[in-house]
Amino acid sequence: MLQLVLNKPTKFVVAVLLIAIGNSYAAEPIGGVFEQSGKPGSIVRTTGEELTAQLDTDVQSYDNVETENGRLKIKFVDDTQISLTEHTLIEITEYVYDPNPSKSKMAMNFVSGTARFATGGLGLVPKENIQIQTPTASIGIRGTDFTTTVDELGRSLVILLPDTNCNDKIKLEEGCRPSGSITVTNAGGTVTLEEAFQAVMVSTFEQSPTQPVTLVDLDLNQIDNMFIVSKPEEIVKAEEDQQETLKGDGGLLDFDGLDKDFLESEDLGKAAERELEFTELDINFLDVDFLRDLLEIMEEADALGEQEESTGSDRLVDRGFGVQGDNQFNILPDVDGKVFFLRVGTNYTSLKIKKGSAGIIEVRDKDLGDTVMCLNNCEGIRITITQQ
Amino acid sequence: MKIFKNLAVSVFALIGLMSYPILADDNEVLLDQDGDNLVLTILQAGTGNTVSGDATESSDLLLSGGSIILDLIQDGDNNDFFGSIVLDGSGSSVLDFYNLGSGNIFDIDAGSTGSADYADMLSSIQGDGNIFDIGIGESASAEYLNFDLVILGSRNDFDTSFTNSNVWTAGVGTNNTGTSTMVGILVDADNVVWNFDITGDDNALATSQSGNSGASLTADIDGSDGDFQFTQNMTTTCTPACTGTINVEIDSENASVSIKQTD
């Protein structure tokens, strides 16, 4: 008689996988709370149901998990673990498990507070299919254990952690390795962290992350929301250096249009002539196909929008969810049962509008101009946002 | 008239707490108090009661000092409160106001001639058709003020008037914005934190925070036909920039909201 012998952690994963497969047509648990301390937080389902986040509570795709004055750990079916410290909010925006790993994927928003993310060792979700988002940056995974601390303005501190067996300074000096590498990306650029306790700060979505710095005299137990109140000295220095660089690198802050008389350029006339000349070589036939493809994509998007509307989902007229290029709002379809509009610039502005509502939002920005965002059929709630 | 005039005075004033409301009507509390560490609770039950500085309501209640703990509960309709509060002193003060009826008039000026720094204020309104005039730090500083406003009722109105531009004035599909004069709460202070929870229909409220930096407003709005304007106007140059935070949650069919932030 064949007997299968499994160790305890493997049994847990197999059990959760069996549950997931066996309930493939129901709302499937994708993991559960396996450690909890202090006051339990909450898990809010996409249906609006709110559960107490206590030990053994299931977690499902699209759940929002929030701690209060307590901590918890979630283990997913692919063995990925997320640890939340006090007053932390994450949104599981998508979690798909498929026996074919290439079809599995995971996407989460780390909205606020301090969370630690450790990818599963089973390789059930390819690293390239994992998307971790903070209000100001996207984090790319290459096999890894890291923390994010997000303050109320969306500013994100990202720290790459070492292997779990070398989590103190002495062992690091003895040559312990980091847990992998991660990339931190936003509209300002990409920074790669490759050393243990290397960290970057991302202040806004537009401004590039700081240069990586290595935090010294730090262990895992020190990483919590205190970093919102008191940043590590190395990060403070990195931010100061970044400000100095922005002032002195010939960037926008250094540009003084009064220093140059553009009309004095001798080449202006010739350049203008060249601009006006039109030859057959200027015809880009690829543009025609591009335009046709673009129209097809728009038609598909419209069809998708109509489909979403017919199923009761919220939709944005002539827009998609995510970061908007014209006004820099990041729009998330479901946060606490509301459509979430967030912009983090010099000022922090957020709107949460109840799902299923209709309305129009006009944004007037001194730098970006006027834009309009329309939720569902546009009629109902009327909002103006002025940034001067 | 000075009723209380000593340091470290602890007062509990229970006015008109009767089994039958008709016996609790038309009471007056007149207060002129100067000193630190005051602990004062005023409970008025019934209708037509007044808290002010004199019997004719022509002058405000006067209250000044530091480390003041004041609780005012007006449990009934058509009560009036007229107060001028100066919160000077080394310690922070906690002021809680509860209006549990309809048709009340509530007029307070915190930090009228001296600072109201580090104050912790709560105004809880649970009734319809109340009129409020709330001024904080208009003539003096009110830094690090924490102000919670809870409205559970309809058609409540605020009397401090100021003008906002870029608010909704027309229907959807045209150039919708224009200038509007609204009433509300005005604070000129740095690092103030406001939390508003407004449930009910037809409420109208405008707020304006000004100062250097660090102002924060969180409003949770639930109701129809409301009109709200939230302004942060940072008046001083900051390094690298003056920052403000506004978070608004809306559950409404047709609320009108204007958010304006100037850095």
Image: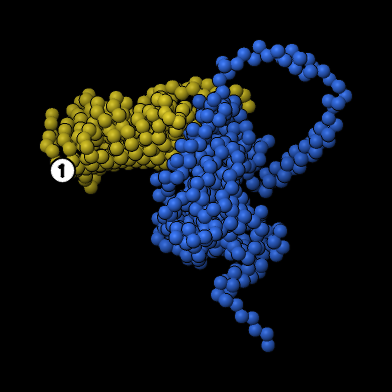
Chain colours: A blue, B yellow
Q: Circle 1 sits in a helix, a strand or a loop, which is it? A: strand
Residue appearing at x 53%, y 42% in the figure: A211
User: In which image quadrant can residue A376 be found?
Assistant: top right
Q: Amino acid at mark 1?
A: Ser
In screen coordinates, is B160 left or right of A375?
A: left
- In the image, residue A65 above or below residue B174: below
| Residue A155 image position (x, y, % from top left) | 49, 42
| Residue A375 image position (x, y, % from top left) | 61, 38
Q: Who is closer to the viewer here, A37 or A202?
A: A202
Residue B125 visible in the current orientation: no
Name the residue furthest front: A174
Q: How many marks?
A: 1
User: In which image quadrant can residue B114 be found?
Assistant: top left
Residue appearing at x 65%, y 60% in the figure: A125
Residue appearing at x 36%, y 26% in the figure: B160
| Residue A295 image position (x, y, % from top left) | 78, 36
Report which residue position mark 1 lands on: B10
User: In which image quadrant can residue A185 be found?
Assistant: top right
Q: Chain of mark 1?
A: B
Residue appearing at x 66%, y 54% in the figure: A129
